[in-house]
Image (spheres, coloured by chain):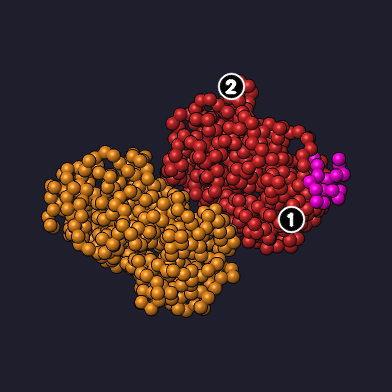
Chain colours: A red, B orange
Amino acid sequence: MTASATDDRTRGEEPAIIDVHDWLQEVAGHTSMEVTRLPLEELPGWRTDPATGNLRHDSGGFFTVEGLDVRRPGEPVPAWTQPIINQPETGILGILLKRVDGVPYVLMQAKNEPGNPDGPQVSPTVQATRSNYTRVHQGRAVPYLEFFREPRGRVLADTRQSEQGAWFYRKRNRNMVVEVAERVPAAEGFRWLPLARVYGLLAVPDRVNMDARTVLSCLPPQRGAEPAGGFAAAVARSRDASRGARHELGEILSWLSGARSTADVRAALVPLDRVRGWRRSGGRISHESGRFFDVIGVRVEARGREVSGWSQPMLAPVGTGLVAFLVRRIGGVVHALVRARVDPGYTDVVELAPTVQCTPGNYDHLPPAARPPLVDLVVDTLAGAAPGRVRFDTVLSEEGGRFHHARNRYVVVETDDDPLPGHPGFRWLALHQIDELLRHSYYLNVEARSLTACLHGLAHGPAYGVPSRARVPLLTAGAR
Amino acid sequence: MTASATDDRTRGEEPAIIDVHDWLQEVAGHTSMEVTRLPLEELPGWRTDPATGNLRHDSGGFFTVEGLDVRRPGEPVPAWTQPIINQPETGILGILLKRVDGVPYVLMQAKNEPGNPDGPQVSPTVQATRSNYTRVHQGRAVPYLEFFREPRGRVLADTRQSEQGAWFYRKRNRNMVVEVAERVPAAEGFRWLPLARVYGLLAVPDRVNMDARTVLSCLPPQRGAEPAGGFAAAVARSRDASRGARHELGEILSWLSGARSTADVRAALVPLDRVRGWRRSGGRISHESGRFFDVIGVRVEARGREVSGWSQPMLAPVGTGLVAFLVRRIGGVVHALVRARVDPGYTDVVELAPTVQCTPGNYDHLPPAARPPLVDLVVDTLAGAAPGRVRFDTVLSEEGGRFHHARNRYVVVETDDDPLPGHPGFRWLALHQIDELLRHSYYLNVEARSLTACLHGLAHGPAYGVPSRARVPLLTAGAR
């Protein structure tokens, strides 16, 4: 089977059988990527601005690492400073979709990034910063970009969304899914995969990258084989907008409007050499406590990528995070418990986050009031010590172009009760309401979108929810 | 009749007859406001920061006047700097609504502001910056605020919206309409007015203030006496979400997502003393050409307001602007032609603006390519030299708390043709699609919202559309 992924059959007219794991491994073999740590002071092409301490590229492009001064009067931690990545340009994350005999296929790329913990991941068709496509870094043209810049085909999703608000200052990307009718051959490193197969791969650690997850979360429900029953069927049914919900959408919007208007948070970029509690030594920037993250430098030697070598700063989080939805059936409709979360890098103060989103170790030194609610409930359920049903539990990594080995344990726990009735910071949203909000910008944060994609994937049934090596039909280059 | 507005009947149980013009004049008599120009250097309580030239209040509250550096590569004006008002806090603009025998009434305030060209205007129930309600300026409590801070009643609208993106840096306010069932007496300076009457007053110059207009634009259609026919009936019908539209909403959202993602605009606050082309002399800041606006200082002596006197900088525009919608019936549904507009102060790059929004004089010195499309068509129609039908034409003023005599001529012209078929910067939106977008933040800019309120008002029929002095029932304090 190893050969079939590249032999003529897979580029021919007929769907072929492929093992995605083999494909990723094969790509990993073709496109080696060697990542070496380098002190920040020695990164070729990058300099520390003498006036500010900010890290920036000689070209002025890509991104900068600056300081952020955050004030939150009245909160357990009322003020702090931190390094933050400032990347003001908007990129495109786009997936091409094509239906064959009614079955949706998506054109995915096996893409390696220096921060990936385990080699190439299944990535969107296009994943391009503006620097990429205006060629600031002199790389090759971005394949398939023309389908998204001036959309060619039927636009199924097209919305600007934020990324990690604790690590990025107002980063946002355009998330798109475009359905094509025409024949679009898969280029080297790309494959047409059944959408259901990609959903299934979400249950495998580090196989589907963050960019693919956020784009998939914005894709409205697609017709396909409906699951027969159980939780999978409940998820599928709950994306039907004609179903009921615990709260009207207007109530949810009003709650969020209130949260955004009353949160007192002021965040301002400051020179990186003015952040307090962080130190630059040993060629990197770390918090004095060893918590949160380090800013490190890496040298990348790549083969089979746009350019053959480069250096860059990266943000390397300390510890694995926990990202969890509590879900509950209300009137037969699956609802997820979302939290109104303030992060300093958000475009509009507050976004809707998973029920739990934290790196537990970051709270060790803080008063109990600062520890997020429901962490213990999720941890106990995972340990079998609480009655919730674990519906999803996989470690996935975050954007490997900026974050080094940033991993979160993504969890969906079904419960029968409301553990926080009437809590002003949380609301139960029906899955079809989440779909409606995802048509618009900046409602769900990137962690909630990743987890929503995983939840949507569960509707494709347990056959796809296990890390099987089962072979499924691969839509090939010449599909109708 | 002059006495009836304040006699016992209007505070009693029965709707009374009131003339809103008389009421405003009476309030003007009770609450004198004297506005005197003062040089910026002599404003008590305000100082010019010696390091930056920025204007700020001694308390650190209210707002600052800073500089903005704007880059728009490839545009007719690829870069400029300007003064801008920076007011990062979010205020509340709220209207209380109550139904009596099915007829909606709204609790409005007759409020004067130093920048109003002609005395008090009909204003929302609550119009409060955070400084107001956290009492930075030591004023009295804001009446009725408790209905909005933790909404008491049924929330009909609650969404954050931007304000003038050319004059404010990322200003946003929470726009709310809350329906109450209980008896809410009208305090001194407040009146319960029939909603239809307020809509009608929009056709009178400078009678309904900007804050009331933006809140009203977010109010979904309210049942009431439906107009019999003609354009008014077409407007009412076109707000019904079950009606068709030229484009699916998804197409509109994708178009906007594209516009936001491709516009290359970078705006950064800079010290006010670094703006180029502006000079500070004679106690104010003006553009060298005399165009755009001046930053002036005023001293205000007021009676019957929160505080009895204060000083502040204001932005005083040069010339009267033109704000116009072209509207067109497509399949019997009224559509408005909106434009994707970039202003440097927007939260997310682009908002949907009226068909025409400009101060024609500001373009005299620029190449023809910089002159906005369709200005001449609207001007010709107003002069009777083009075949469009003028449906609305009234001069209204902008927020009088920050802007001094800022007036725009608001115009709705109905046309049978599409003057710019396929233009990438414009789209026809059905009125019910505008309603749907107004549930969310930052889609329609403040000028489009003002004009949308005027358009909605037309559905209440020509009887309300003329500046009559006709007397209509006034809902009084003790209404059921």
Chain of residue at mark 2: A
Question: Which of the 4 image quarters holds residue A135?
Answer: bottom right
Q: Is residue A13 magenta?
A: yes
Which amino acid does the dot numbered 2 rest on?
Ala
Discs 1, 2 touching: Cβ within 8 Å: no
Q: Is residue B233 above or below residue A194?
A: below
Answer whether residue B47 is visible to the viewer in this image. Answer: no
Q: Earlier in the sequence, mark 1 or mark 2?
A: 1
Looking at the figure, which quarter contains the N terminus of chain A?
top right
Membership of B466 in magenta stretch:
no
**Foreground pick, A236 / A300:** A236
Left or right of A277? Residue A141 is: right
Q: Where is residue A436 drawn, in percent x and y? A: 52, 45
Say what amino acid the circle numbered 1 marks: Val
Please tell me whether mark 1 sits on a helix, a strand or a loop. Answer: loop
Q: Nearer the viewer, residue A174 or B438?
A: B438
Q: Which residue does the image show at 47% across and 55% down from the upper left?
A: B244
For mark 2, give the secondary structure. loop
Q: Position of residue A277 (x, y in %)?
A: 58, 43
Tell me what residue is drawn at x 74 percent, y 55 percent: A184
Disc 1 packing (10 Å; few <14; some 14–19; many ≥20) = some
Of labels 1 and 2, the one closer to you: 1
Q: Quadrant of residue B83?
A: bottom left
Instruction: Tell me which corner region of the image, top left, top right, bottom left or bottom right, holds residue B323.
Output: bottom left
Look at 61% across and 32% down and name the residue there: A233
Which residues are drawn in magenta? A1-20
What residue do we see at 40% from left, 47% from top? B158
Read off the residue under disc 2: A386
Q: Which residue is mark 1?
A: A184
Q: Chain of mark 1?
A: A
